[in-house]
Amino acid sequence: MTDLINNYKISFLGGLGEIGKNCAVVQFKDKLLIIDCGIMFPTEEMPGVDLVIPDFSSILESGREISGVVITHGHEDHIGALGYLLAQIPLKIYGSSLALKISAFRVNELGLKSRATFYEVSDLERLSIGPFDVEFIPVTHSVPHSFAVAIHTEMGAIIHTGDFKLDLYPTDERRTNLSRFGEISRTETVRLLLADSTNADKAGVTESESTVGVELDKIFSDRSDSRIITACFASHLHRIEQIINVANSHGRRVKILGKSMSRNIKVACDLNVIDIPKNILIETDDIDKLDDSKLCIICTGSQGEPLAALSQLAFGQYRSVSIKNGDTVILSSHPIPGNERSVSKVINALGVKGADVYHSMMSSVHVSGHARSHEISTLISIVKPKAYIPVHGEHRHLKANASIAQKMGVSQVLVCLDGDVVEVTEQDLTVVGKVDSSYVFVDGILDDVDSNLLHERKTLALDGIVIAIVVIDPVSKRLIHPTKVITRGWVDSVEGDNLIEKAGSVVDDFLLDLPKNPSLDKNQLSDEIKILVSRFVRSNTKRKPTVVPVIIGI
Ligand SMILES: [Zn+2]
Ligand SMILES: [Zn+2]
């Protein structure tokens, strides 16, 4: 099928129906522009999975040239999958210097540096990427130098907000550039707005980032004798900057725990993205030399990630620092949906060790980086889009965002999900097809974990395994030993000894007749033994472990 020459198509490979793995592909004149290329962190439903990436097969199999990848900001759910796409195809990547530096760490770790060409763009820069006329518009968010992206077309602009909020008092005074949005709306009209939905179901406006500094200052005053440990996202550089500056104003020096945080701070200082006092940061050896009232530790792990510094502190696994009675711990963060339980465990463990914990449910130590409904309405009233598609969020967030646009009088509002292909013409906005957008699970260095494998892992975890080892004389077809049954997770090996033995005898009895059936091949025999043992296990224990026959000699 030939594509109508001036029409644009957008396919969503991720971020519509879940929080994470944001990736949208814009097609024009047989060329592709990718907006973001992120990962999603696995849920408890995905045992053993390290991360989830978008399914890139529709891009790779289309044969169309990728003009470039545009990165809206340096969060993992927008940049984390770049390496996995680069492994398949070399790419030109456009973004802020900070987002590109953070992306480069991952790409270099995977040894793919030579396949990526990075192009730094600055605020309001407009450039041609293949046939796409792309402009980078500043927005406020929870990582510095975030962008919305405008693609200027003959039918008006297509604007993608990236992740955004309307913070009027950001710590770096780099505000969401509403006047530029208004100007585009006036001078060329906005054909389509794709807008962040993460907080669309929350009324009102998200507080300014600068309010967190005020709250932190109060806690530092109240807890002036205590050692203070603060956890936040390693990429939330304005938060880290605020914590460091508050610590400094209370005469404390700062120790950073967590490799990614140290690395990001260094990059942000080199790029002048943050401004912190010289020599404020100390080495691990200096921790014990400082009085508790003179020390502030800032660490990673605010989402309860088991391998990050805060969890290790909470569970006494951090080598050089341990939590002690009277410590103050501030979680300057809010759990991402799905992480509530792990965060709760960490808060409990810290409390048991004697720490007083401040978190976002009880104190204003965190604000979100995403716009709430009134900010979204404000943006819509300035952008005045003819059409609207909510992006970034679970279905309920997308629906809430769509209803805001409808209330604001946008005539074409479309709720899409991962895999939808939307065609944008002068008049219409229509879902015209579907691409594969399944979750691709990465475990270790492989991305071959499919839903069957996940199902097997869950069955093993929930019901255990029973292995029946059968050794048969290849000539006489008689059993050489009685069948040996081994189990993990079916019955206790002491209490269930009797059952395990009986399961073996059931197989032995069946195999007595084997010499009379010499034509039975290994697969048939294996199937029969599996059925026998499964039936025995079920009727005696009402359990359904995985049964694996191991047949030697045939
Ligand atoms: Zn973000
Ligand atoms: Zn995001």
Image: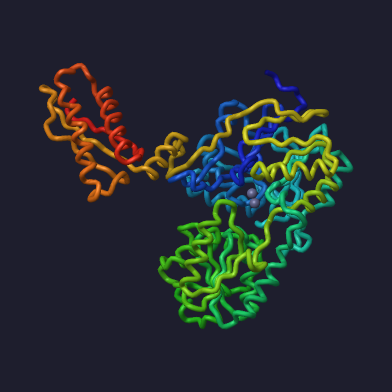
Left or right of residue 167: residue 44: left
Q: Quadrant of the N terminus?
A: top right
Task: Give the image's coloring scheme.
Answer: rainbow
Which residue occupies the foreground of this view, 485 or 115?
Answer: 485
Hey, which residue is sitting farthest right in the picture?
186
Residue 420: x and y, percent? 66, 31
Residue 123: x and y, percent? 74, 52
Q: Quadrant of the C terminus?
A: top left
Which residue occupies the foreground of this view, 198 or 539?
Answer: 539
Which residue occupies the foreground of this view, 44 or 283?
Answer: 44
Q: How many marks?
A: 0
Image position of 267 with respect to 201: above or below: below
Please name the residue shown 18% across and 35% down the image. 505
Q: Is residue 468 visible?
A: yes
Hey, which residue is sitting farthest top in the picture?
519
Which residue occupies the foreground of this view, 502 or 130?
Answer: 502
Left or right of residue 507: residue 121: right
Residue 550 image-quadrant placement: top left
Please name the residue shown 74% across and 41% down the image. 194
Residue 289: x and y, percent? 47, 81
Please name the residue shown 66% across and 57% down the image. 142
Q: Is residue 270 visible?
A: no
Residue 402 image-quadrant placement: top right
Residue 375: x and y, percent? 78, 53
Please name the residue shown 57% across and 60% down the image. 234
Image position of 434 with respect to 16: above or below: above
Left or right of residue 48: residue 17: right
Left or right of residue 67: residue 230: left
